[in-house]
């Protein structure tokens, strides 16, 4: 399957739920209800999960030789590096991060820099409930960890020149009464793809399918990442959430962003971590 | 000093606000670095605290929003959703009917802040570290912001410093204990409609913000009441009344007016990067 054909499959046909494709003869589109807070299931298991039954390429997963939670209960984010999705140059950047993790030196995640987690990274932030605020023409996704926010504009095409930004340009539409499909382009290359620290390029395109269960107890997001600058082929993964009462706490990263001991950042072990500051105020 | 602040500041040990703040710092640092142990994460993150029965709301597995997720305004005047942008900016907060009614402590604090900002011993962290401006300073900021109305809530999303301010509708304020231990830059807000006016009551502010860019002070005893109303289809006003007996001799008010900008999409905002051009906003002086 070609790269573009696979993406079209994600956008219009669904990946694991082909029965949910839009019916042109069906009733008027109902808007699925994503309200409330959503709590990641599997916090300490994987960064992204493989989609059960999906025959295509999948996400990086924890290296079985270096379990994510070892006997001392230290977290190790070491991926199995034999995944064929990795281009050689991506592997070359990722390998030292993984090796540092195995040595017990954790790498800094995007939110550790007080920077946006981007897409699909925002699905992967721990420490709070993600929320989808639905208005007629927009879905706004917010996360309390450093007050992250991304915007999805509904039923409109991409702009001619979206540029390159932290969350890119997202457009979306509802499908089948239970799904929100989001297509994101125009991302910068500053964020990490996953919690292993896998880099990506600014060519990355992400198509996400948010599907809420009929009883509103769970939310599953399946997505496909297509980035010929970083990966050899498109790959797909999922994250799952369970419903919780919304509880948006105020968590401000920059007020005290400190780390203890050695961390791995910018390709080296260090005790100094960058936090964005403005030398000159904007106004 | 306000009633709430007196109680906890006089506590001799293990001040709860500090304890929570410390945990938050730990989460920020350790969680971001991937250092968090499973037990620590489970004990202190918002998500897992909820599992243990903490936080706003206790019940499991909500079943969505009756009537659906889209808010339907009862009248056009109660539809305040959209992207709004201030008509003008002032570094000094504009007090209706005069000047800030500073008391003795407030005057001394203000003079101290101004001097320290000038000689550099005090940093305006909202501008240099991009932490939230807090209320009321955020109300006059020269960047656009978006009001998002959903059933049971109004959410203010500011472009500046990507501040998010959730305001539950027709809900009780959080408990006095939470107001004491969880002090927020933007405070804890609840709101209700009085006719076509959205009335927002806010308490539980931290003391890390100024009222304006000149360093006007407030304490954590500050409470505010905002009255937000559409003046016409494309203009919105927010009249805020500030009460803070630690700093002022009486309550005072300020008024902010915004224009609707449906053509504007809010942008990402990361500290130190190049941001939207605001040089044309009246009153803005962009440093060279």
Image (cartoon, coloured by chain):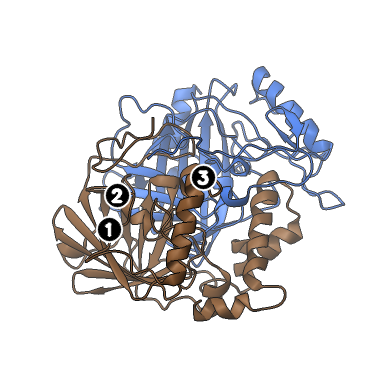
Who's the residue at 44% across and 40% down the image? B269
Q: Secondary structure at mark 3?
A: helix
Who's the residue at 86% across and 52% down the image? A72
The residue to which callout 2 is attached is B90
- Residue A128 appears in the picture as rendered: yes
| Letter of the chain that mark 2 sits on in the rendering | B
Residue B252 at what x, y percent from top left? 30, 70
Left or right, A265 with respect to B273, comes to right
In the foreground, B82 or B59:
B82
| Letter of the chain that mark 1 sits on in the rendering | B
* Colour chosen for chain A: blue
Q: Secondary structure at mark 1?
A: loop
Q: Earlier in the sequence, mark 3 or mark 1?
A: 1
Label 3 Cα neighbours within 10 Å, binned few <14 / some 14-19 / many ≥20 = few
| Letter of the chain that mark 3 sits on in the rendering | B
Which circle marks residue B119 in the picture? 3
């Amino acid at each position: 399957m070609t790269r573009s054909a696979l993406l079209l499959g994600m956008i219009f046909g669904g990946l694991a739920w082909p029965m949910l494709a839009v019916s042109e003869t069906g009733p008027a589109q109902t808007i699925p209800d994503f309200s409330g807070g959503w709590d990641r299931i599997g916090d300490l298991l994987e960064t992204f999960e493989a989609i059960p039954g999906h025959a295509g390429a999948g996400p990086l997963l924890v290296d079985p030789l270096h379990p994510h939670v070892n006997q001392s209960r230290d977290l190790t984010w070491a991926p199995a590096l034999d995944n064929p999705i990795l281009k050689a140059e991506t592997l070359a950047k990722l390998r030292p991060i993984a090796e540092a993790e195995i040595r017990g030196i954790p790498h800094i995640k995007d939110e550790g820099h007080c920077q946006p987690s981007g897409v699909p990274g925002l699905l992967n932030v721990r420490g709070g409930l993600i929320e989808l605020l639905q208005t007629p023409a927009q879905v706004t996704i917010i996360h309390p960890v450093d007050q992250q926010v991304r915007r999805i504009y509904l039923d409109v095409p991409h702009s001619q020149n979206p540029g390159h930004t932290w969350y890119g340009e997202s457009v979306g539409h509802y499908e089948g009464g239970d799904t929100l499909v989001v297509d994101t382009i125009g991302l910068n290359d500053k964020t990490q793809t996953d919690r292993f620290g896998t880099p990506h390029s600014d060519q990355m395109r992400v198509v996400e399918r948010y599907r809420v269960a009929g009883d509103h107890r769970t939310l599953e997001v399946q997505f496909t990442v297509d980035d010929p600058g970083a990966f050899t082929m498109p790959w797909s993964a999922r994250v799952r959430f369970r419903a919780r009462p919304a509880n948006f706490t105020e968590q401000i990263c920059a007020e005290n962003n400190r780390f203890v001991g050695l961390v791995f950042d910018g390709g080296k072990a260090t005790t100094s971590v960058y936090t964005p500051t403005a030398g000159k105020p904007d106004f | 000093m306000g009633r709430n602040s007196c109680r906890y500041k006089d506590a001799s040990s293990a001040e709860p606000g500090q304890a929570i703040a410390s945990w938050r710092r730990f989460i920020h640092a350790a969680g971001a670095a991937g250092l968090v142990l499973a037990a620590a994460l489970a004990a202190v993150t918002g998500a897992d605290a909820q599992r243990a029965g903490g936080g706003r709301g206790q019940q499991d597995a909500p079943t969505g929003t009756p009537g659906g997720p889209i808010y339907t305004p009862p009248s056009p005047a109660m539809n305040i959703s959209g992207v709004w942008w201030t008509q003008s900016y002032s570094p000094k907060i504009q007090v209706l009917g005069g000047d800030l009614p500073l008391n003795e402590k407030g005057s001394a604090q203000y003079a101290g802040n101004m001097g320290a900002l000038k000689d550099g011993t005090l940093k305006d962290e909202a501008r240099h570290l991009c932490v939230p401006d807090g209320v009321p300073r955020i109300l006059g900021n020269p960047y656009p912001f978006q009001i998002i109305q959903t059933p049971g809530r109004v959410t203010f999303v500011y472009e500046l410093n990507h501040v998010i301010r959730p305001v539950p509708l027709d809900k009780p304020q959080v408990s006095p204990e939470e107001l004491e231990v969880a002090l927020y830059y933007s405070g804890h807000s609840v709101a209700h409609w009085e006719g076509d006016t959205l009335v927002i009551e806010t308490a539980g502010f931290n003391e890390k913000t100024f009222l304006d860019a000149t360093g006007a002070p407030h304490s954590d005893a500050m409470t505010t009441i905002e009255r937000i109303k559409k003046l016409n289809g494309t203009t919105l006003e927010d009249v805020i009344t500030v009460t803070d007996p630690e700093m002022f001799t009486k309550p005072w008010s300020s008024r902010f007016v915004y224009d609707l900008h449906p053509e504007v999409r809010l942008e990402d905002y990361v500290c130190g990067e190049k941001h939207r051009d605001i040089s044309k906003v009246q009153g803005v002086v962009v440093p060279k």
